[in-house]
């Protein structure tokens, strides 16, 4: 069965601190996709990144970076020099590749609070 | 096209009433998804359309729920005989192809059943 676990329910940091959000997934498929979404108070889910299971290269986009490790089934997300605008709920999600366009399986989310 | 649009943004209804939500996807997207999100949880998949065909339904979609996508454009999600447990945020997403930049989500419709 597919499952995404985000063990950290809430994290509070002070501006400019680095913070890592953990994501552990379970799947029996060898081909799958992993995603991170940001959900600000407005409610809309904002796409951050997609990685496929064959690409384990770490990725950096500005202050955001992602560490994908198949050996530990983890896809962690780090925000460097956090800012107040980073405050939101962050979701890790998994989808398995098949022809039907499968749905995303989300974790329960991590609420990040960044104070000034 | 400014993204996925959902209406209404908020809906308060009495238990037992029927409600209908609308989703307008990005116009060129042929895939449309409905999700439900309760407080403190991640979104849970409800159903999926490719064009006008409903291709997948979650076991969460009880017989009180029905979704349509006539003509493969906008979609509606109807809940009949609402129950307090139906209170949630209902999210719509659309995509052009599987994967890629993923799914574009709307801002959701928040349903409160009193």
Image (cartoon, rainbow, N blue to C red):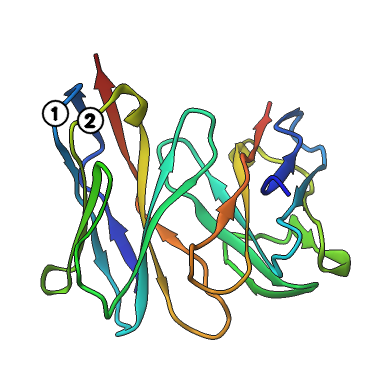
Residue visible at 76% across and 29% down in the picture: B13
- The chain containing the residue under callout 2 comes to A
Secondary structure under badge 1? loop
Residue visible at 21% across and 47% down in the picture: A7
Q: Which mark is residue A82?
A: 2
Image-based side of B99 in relation to B26, left or right: left
Question: In whole angstroms, how far apart are the C-alphas of marks 2 and 1?
Answer: 5 Å
Q: Position of residue A78 (x, y in %)?
A: 20, 45
Image-based side of B20 in relation to A11, left or right: right
Q: Which residue does the numbered mark 1 point to in the structure image?
A: A17
Q: Is residue A69 above or below residue B6?
A: below
Q: Position of residue A1 (x, y in %)?
A: 34, 74
Residue visible at 61% across and 39% down in the picture: B107
Q: Position of residue B18 (x, y in %)?
A: 82, 42
Residue A54 position by quadrant: bottom left
Point out the image quarter for the C terminus of chain A: top left
Q: Is residue A56 above or below residue B89?
A: below
Q: Position of residue A107 (x, y in %)?
A: 35, 53
Q: Which mark is residue A88?
A: none
- The chain containing the residue under callout 1 comes to A
Earlier in the chain: of badge 2 and badge 1, it is 1
Residue B10 position by quadrant: top right
Whether pointer 2 and pointer 1 mark residues with C-beta atoms closer than 8 Å, the reply is: yes
């Amino acid at each position: 069965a597919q499952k995404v676990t985000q063990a950290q329910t809430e994290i509070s940091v002070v501006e400019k601190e680095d913070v890592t959000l953990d994501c552990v997934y379970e799947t029996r498929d060898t081909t799958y996709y992993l995603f991170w979404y940001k959900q600000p108070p407005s409610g809309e889910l904002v796409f951050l990144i997609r990685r496929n299971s064959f690409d384990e290269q770490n990725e950096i986009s500005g202050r955001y970076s992602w560490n994908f490790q198949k050996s530990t089934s983890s896809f962690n997300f780090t925000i460097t020099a956090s800012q107040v605008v980073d405050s939101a709920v962050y979701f890790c999600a998994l989808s398995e590749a098949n022809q039907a366009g499968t749905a995303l399986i989300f974790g329960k989310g991590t609420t990040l609070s960044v104070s000034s | 096209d400014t993204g996925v649009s959902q209406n209404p943004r908020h809906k308060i209804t009495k238990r037992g009433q029927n409600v209908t939500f609308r989703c307008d996807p990005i116009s060129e997207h042929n895939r449309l998804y409905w999700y439900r999100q309760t407080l403190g949880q991640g979104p849970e998949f409800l159903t999926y359309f490719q064009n006008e065909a409903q291709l997948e339904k979650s076991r969460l979609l009880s017989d009180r729920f029905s979704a349509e996508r006539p003509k493969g454009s906008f979609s509606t999600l109807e809940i009949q005989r609402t129950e307090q447990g139906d209170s949630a945020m209902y999210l719509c997403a659309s995509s052009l192809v599987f994967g890629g930049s993923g799914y574009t989500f709307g801002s959701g419709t928040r349903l409160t059943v009193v």
